[in-house]
Amino acid sequence: MISKTEYARRRKRLMTMMGPETVAIIPSAQEIIRSRDTHFNFRQDSDFHYLSGFNEPESVLVLIPGRKHGDFIIFNRERDLEKETWHGRREGQQGVIDNYAAADAFPIEDIDDILPGLMEGRKRIYCAIGNDKEFDEKILAWLNALRTNVSGAETHGEIIDVRHFLHDMRLYKSPAEVKLMRTAAQISAKAHIRAMQKSRPGLCEYHLEAELHHEFARLGARFPAYTSIVAGGENACILHYVENDDKMKDGDLMMIDAGAEYQLYASDISRTFPINGLFTKNQKIIYGWVLKAQLAAIETIRPGACWNAPHEAAVKVLTKGLIEMGILKGRLQTLIKNEAYKPFYMHKTGHWLGLDVHDVGDYQVGGEPRVLEPGMVLTVEPGLYISKEIKKVPKQWKGLAVRIEDDVLVTEDGYEVLSKDTPKTIDEIESLMSQSAA
Ligand code: GLY
Ligand code: MN
Ligand code: MN
């Protein structure tokens, strides 16, 4: 759990970076209609959550450095017994003061009347302009209200993107965040193991999806961090395959890319295994290359390494594999330079991971690739995708696809694989699949 003091620390840090005579305005996520009058499950906006831990829609968080009566204000829904009876509990204004350390709280309906006053005298407005058109318009309306007021207070109303600071903060995970991410990865590991053990020809992909989600929820992670990918056979050539409704065939591989979200922190794990529990000779070969690429990529991770180093290491091994498999012909260096591997490996080897699966944080600083530092978490996810659509590929490889993905924390002296409990050697997978799930 993230403590109240950690949330307070984050707000203070952001306000220190913002400086005096500023204000930050950050809206919550909104409920989204799925169909007619049913909604998708509510997921709080990650920036809003990062600064408050408050989990209701229709809220706006305001930070006002140096404000005499407190620098942290929330606008949120009022308590309403009838609405709460139908739709769920609300904290109300007193609730966010008592439980979320807001200095002041006001009904969201009153924001147009109150917020311009709070912005008075604040020369720079920090917000995420361009993120939500409707909210952008509100900010402009509040600024205009401020400009046309008669108090005579000086206001320049310069708008600055709060994400520069906020997303850089989110890139460096605190010990408490790492703990949650480790738990998310451990839960996912158990779910992947369960899916492997439940796999057999004749099931549908969504049966394994159900096994994954069963294990997530059973272990305290009710929702996946992203739509689970359960791709049998050639479906795995579609990188973000989410239909998950095909029959699972004897002799095919299964590629699962699924991760639990634990207290809003994501995990993101991919594993590939034979549906019937035993790899064929050719499956072992292609799997072996991807695993070798993944291990080489992980080995590059340490403070001071370039964030792109895992990708370069993976591309080298994968291209070598493609040559050895007779899929590519030519000199290794030339093929790498010409990106000849791209039809079979078209994505990057990883991304930041945190509150979001493709987490925030710049990949370049001052035009240079970012250098890894302790506390950053990234995925390492090489793959090979030999689509049947691609011509001139020896036929034994056609339709095979493998991705292996782990979540890796940069530590003081190297790395920690947060998802290390998810088996990935051929022997581990085959032995595990010979035992059935509890
Ligand atoms: N699960 C999406 C990704 O691996 O990036
Ligand atoms: Mn990923
Ligand atoms: Mn993934």
Image (cartoon, grey):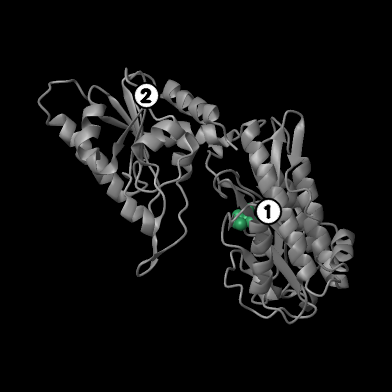
Q: Compared to 119, does 277 lie above or below?
A: below
Judged from the image, the quadrant occupied by ligand 1 is bottom right
191, 291: nearer the viewer: 191
At 49% across and 27% down in the image, what residue appears?
A: 8
- Residue 303 seen in render: yes
Look at mark 2 in the image and give the residue it sits on: 71
Q: Is residue 136 above or below residue 342?
A: above
**In the rendered view, would you say 239 is above or below 368?**
below
Q: Residue furthest toward the left? A: 150
Dot 1 amino acid type:
Leu
* Residue 413 located left or right of residue 71: right
The answer to whether residue 371 is seen in the rendering is no
Between tags 1 and 2, which lies in front? 1
- Give the SS element for disc 1: loop
Q: Nearer the viewer, residue 312 or 175?
A: 175
The residue singled out by tag 1 in the image is 219
